[in-house]
Amino acid sequence: MVRREKTHAPLDIRHLRRSELPVDTLKLARYLIGKMLVHDLPQGRLSGRIVETEAYPIGDPAGHSFGGETPSRRSLFLERGRSYVYFTYGSCFMMNVSSEKAGEGAGVLLRALEPLEGIALMERHRGTQHLVDLARGPGRLAKAMHIDKRYDGVDLCADGPLWLGVALRSAGTIGMSIRIGITREVHQLYRFYERGSPYVSGLKRLRY
DNA sequence: AAGAAGATTCGCT
DNA sequence: GCGAATCTTCTTA
């Protein structure tokens, strides 16, 4: 397989400014489809296009902010554009983008990326060379991008190692569906994805 | 102090 | 497709 970063110049990715982020969890979840997640490591840059998200808005019983702020969940209550990283099922980190005003608990779960730069390093992190599986699913995404609890609370609009960006290619058609893996509010259409992308998880559940 | 649940993944059938 | 793995956090005693 031809590796993009060896045959193309580095992508021209510009930082997203906080003022560009919609001040609404559902709008932000849709807005982030087609945007870039970038992690600059000493070994090189990891980047990918966001192709799948889920919204966990204010007051959502399925959201981690439901029931109020705790030390482990404080990042969800930060101003929009900060990361909330948590560990679950004894094996997976997952990354959210906080999505409302400071003091309001809500977030957007990043569920899948189309890997673009640093693919060889992502393959090492994930232990597989199957491109479409590298960041398909929230736990795999975090592992491929080398995201763990150290990155909880990071400002994704600041000039740090982990950030959100915009590259030239925009999103295609955006679809909606029910969210995956939850037991409450299961009927809400709070999941957004790029139609036709092979990098989206749970393809069998895309019915909308 | 003990137990249960959890925004999943992987391996096996 | 199904079920185990695995551990943090929160609840209850």
Image (cartoon, coloured by chain):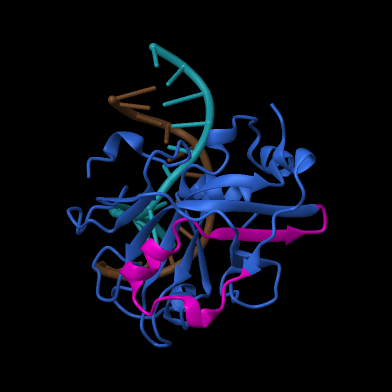
Chain colours: A blue, B cyan, C brown
Judge from the rendering whether residue A91 lies leftward or rightward of residue A63; answer left or right: right
Residue span colored magenta:
A15-43
Q: Is residue A29 visible?
A: yes
| Along the viewing direction, whichever of A151 and A49 lies nearer the viewer | A49
Q: Is residue A71 visible?
A: no
Furthest residue to the left? A187
Measured as percent of width and height from the top left, residue C9 is found at 44, 68
Q: Residue at x 60, y 59 (%)?
A: A167
Furthest residue to the right? A42
- Looking at the picture, does residue C1 appear above or below residue A95? above
Judge from the rendering whether residue C10 lies leftward or rightward of residue A140; answer left or right: left
Judge from the rendering whether residue A88 lies leftward or rightward of residue A23; answer left or right: right
Residue A69 location, quadrant: bottom left
Measured as percent of width and height from the top left, residue A31 is found at 41, 65
Quarter containing the N terminus of chain A: top right
- Looking at the picture, does residue A146 appear above or below residue A158? above
| Along the viewing direction, whichever of A89 and A153 lies nearer the viewer | A153
Measured as percent of width and height from the top left, residue C10 is found at 35, 70
- Looking at the picture, does residue A134 appear above or below residue A58? above
Q: Is residue A165 magenta?
A: no
Measured as percent of width and height from the top left, residue A158 is found at 64, 78
Quarter containing the C terminus of chain A: top left
Q: Residue at x 34, y 71 (%)?
A: A25
Q: Residue at x 44, y 57 (%)?
A: A33
| Along the viewing direction, whichever of A105 and A129 lies nearer the viewer | A129
- Looking at the picture, does residue A90 appear above or below residue A72? above
Q: Residue at x 64, y 46 (%)?
A: A116
